[in-house]
Amino acid sequence: MKLEALSLADVDALVALDAATNIHPWTAPLWRDTLNQQHTVGFRDAGGQLGGAAVFSRVLDEAELLMIAIAPAQQGKGLGRALLDGVLRQLAAEGVREMFLEVRASNQRAQALYQSAGANEIGQRRNYYPCAGGREDAHLYAFYLSAAA
């Protein structure tokens, strides 16, 4: 998988990917702001379509994964793990020592991915995410990149 930095030219593809994979997708204006302020990387499928993307922020030697998504047609092929591994390698090469993230309590698939990639659950945030029945908890994870690099 070849990761590439995404740009404003990718806004429509990011909006579509997010809408297909997220129950609360970001709007096009939010994606434009994100592309201007955060690190956004992705990969393309054989047809040149956006197959997956990840957004992360950095402050000194820490990072936070804000979003990771794989196009539904590409899921189940190990691409989520490959994308995550690529982000972790990139951050480690840039001197980042820890990456944090939150994930919905109901998102067992993502939690399994993070745990299999070496993340440690470090806490929870009660009633963090909106959901159909009100709110749900977030599980907090940390990757220690010195050990993962």
Image: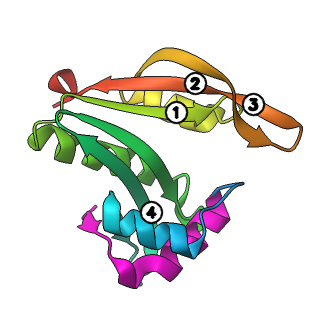
**What residue is disc 2 on?**
139
Q: What SS does tag 2 mark?
A: strand
Residue 3 in view, yes or no = yes
Q: Report the front residue among 131 and 42.
A: 131
Instruction: Determine the CA span between mark 3 and mark 4.
Output: 25 Å
Q: What SS does tag 1 mark?
A: strand
Q: Position of residue 91 (x, y in %)?
A: 20, 43
User: Which image quadrant: the C terminus?
Assistant: top left
Q: Is residue 39 magenta?
A: no
**What residue is disc 3 on?**
136
Q: Earlier in the sequence, mark 2 or mark 1?
A: 1
Residue 39 falls left or right of residue 90: right
Instruction: Determine the CA span between mark 1 and mark 3.
Output: 12 Å
The amino acid beneath tag 3 is: Glu
Residue 7 placement: quadrant: bottom left
Q: What SS does tag 3 mark?
A: strand
Q: Which residues are magenta?
A: 1-21
Residue 35 falls left or right of residue 51: left
Q: Position of residue 3 (x, y in %)?
A: 26, 63
Q: Which mark is residue 16?
A: none
The amino acid beneath tag 2 is: His
The amino acid beneath tag 1 is: Glu
Instruction: Determine the CA span between mark 3 and mark 2.
Output: 10 Å
Residue 128 placement: quadrant: top right
Colour setting = rainbow
The amino acid beneath tag 4 is: Gly
